[in-house]
Image: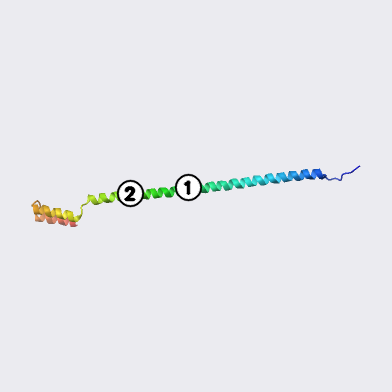
Amino acid sequence: MVRRRGGRGLLGTVARTAVISSTATAASNATSNAMNQKAMQAQQKQAAEMQAQAEMEQLKTQLANVQATQAQAAAPVAAAAQPDLLTQLTQLAQLKDAGALTDAEFQLAKAKLLG
């Protein structure tokens, strides 16, 4: 009769090793999956921030273009609203020559134009 000493035997040791190995593999996979998921979330957050920044830059560029267009459109209006000084003085002289203005009225209007 073969007697076993208080140990598990070869089959028990192999089974125990298999259980420990599979538990360690499962724990390693779970940790790896959690780390991958965190990394993916960080990448998504970074991509969203970069997209938001790009959209902000695009909006700034559009605003600058609109402001430039408005400034260009306003410049001719302002220039057209005030005839140049030489034209106004010429008109005053023509009115004086035509007799519509006296010398005093001409001098007063000219002084007003010249500031």
Local secondary structure at mark 2 = helix
Q: Say what secondary structure mark 1 lies in.
A: helix
| Gap in angstroms between the C-alphas marked 2 and 1 | 27 Å
Q: Dot 1 corresponds to which residue? A: 51
What's the colour scheme? rainbow
In the picture of the structure, the residue carrying the numbered disc 2 is 69
* Mark sitting earlier along the chain (2/1): 1
> Viewer-proximal residue, 30 or 108?
30
| Quadrant where the N terminus is found in the figure | top right
Which residue type carries mark 2?
A: Thr
Residue lying at the far top in this picture: please name it. Answer: 1
Q: Quadrant of the C terminus?
A: bottom left
Which residue shows up at 45% across the image and 49% down it?
54
Residue for point 10% across, 56% down: 104
Mark 1: few/some/many CA within 10 Å (<14, 14-19, 20+): few
Q: Is residue 91 left or right of residue 79?
A: left
Q: Which of the pair 6/61 is nearer the observer?
A: 61
- Asked whether, in this view, residue 34 is left or right of residue 64, the answer is right
Q: Residue at x 70, y 46 (%)?
A: 24
Left or right of residue 82, residue 34 in this image: right
Q: Position of residue 87 (x, y in %)?
A: 17, 54
Q: In front: 30, or 14?
A: 14
Report x, y in % for residue 23.
71, 44
Residue 14 location in percent, x, y?
78, 45
